[in-house]
Image: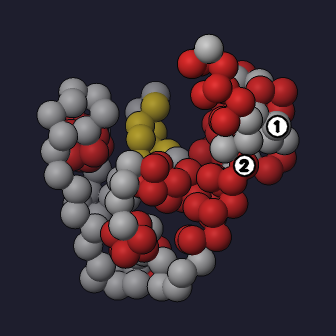
Amino acid sequence: DNQKNGWKAVCIHQHANGECFKCPVRALGRRVLHIRDNKGPPETYLSAFWANGSCHFVTNNHISVGLKMAAAALDYPSCKGIPIDRIDTHSLHCGGANALALSGYSDRQIQKMGRWRSATFLEYIKESLFESSAGMSTNIKCSFN
């Protein structure tokens, strides 16, 4: 009943994209099947998983640790200039907004998809695009020579 930011009865619709593993609809279907296969009751959260016969839940801490491990493995501090301690679950929200902006979605579409009530998301897009554009003109110039 309680969605992000305390909004109730809010639905964000996703369409199938035809991909086997990268489709949000199929991913949701896999979660439901996993819960059913393990005899989870209908009210079981989608974050539930079973290991060695017992039910566990993915927490924000699990996601945070996973993100930090991935960033360390990809050497983000050296390659991207982003310290590991600045990477957290909020990075996914900001990154999603930037991915949508770079894909050409309107500010209104991004705001609705991220469930922002204000224009705060514009700060994330502006800041991140500024940081990610560092050196672009030099790189483009080099590729045409």
- Measuring 46% from the left and 31% from the top, which residue is drawn there? 51
111 or 25, which lies in front? 111
Query: Which residue is denoted by mark 1 in the rendering?
Result: 81
- Measuring 69% from the left and 53% from the top, which residue is drawn there? 130
Residue that extends furthest to the front in the rendered view of this protein: 145
Report x, y in % for residue 143: 59, 18
- Measuring 56% from the left and 71% from the top, which residue is drawn there? 121
Choose mark 1 or mark 2, whichever is in front. Answer: 2
Report x, y in % for residue 48: 41, 48
User: Up-down: is 135 above or below 79?
Assistant: below
Q: Secondary structure at mark 2?
A: helix
- Measuring 38% from the left and 49% from the top, which residue is drawn there? 103
120 or 93, which lies in front? 120
Within 10 angstroms of label 1, few (less than 14), some, or many (20 or more) residues? few
- Amino acid identity at mark 1: Gly
Report x, y in % for residue 59: 57, 52
Residue 142 found in image quarter: top right
User: Up-down: is 42 above or below 11?
Assistant: above
Query: Which residue is denoted by mark 2 in the rendering?
Result: 131
Q: Secondary structure at mark 1?
A: loop
99 or 130, which lies in front? 130
Report x, y in % for residue 62: 62, 44
Q: Is residue 127 left or right of residue 95?
A: right
The earlier-in-sequence mark between 1 and 2 is 1
Q: Quadrant of the C terminus?
A: top right
Within 10 angstroms of label 2, few (less than 14), some, or many (20 or more) residues? few
- Labels 1 & 2 near each other (Cβ < 8 A): yes
Q: CA distance from mark 1 to mark 2?
A: 10 Å
- Amino acid identity at mark 2: Glu
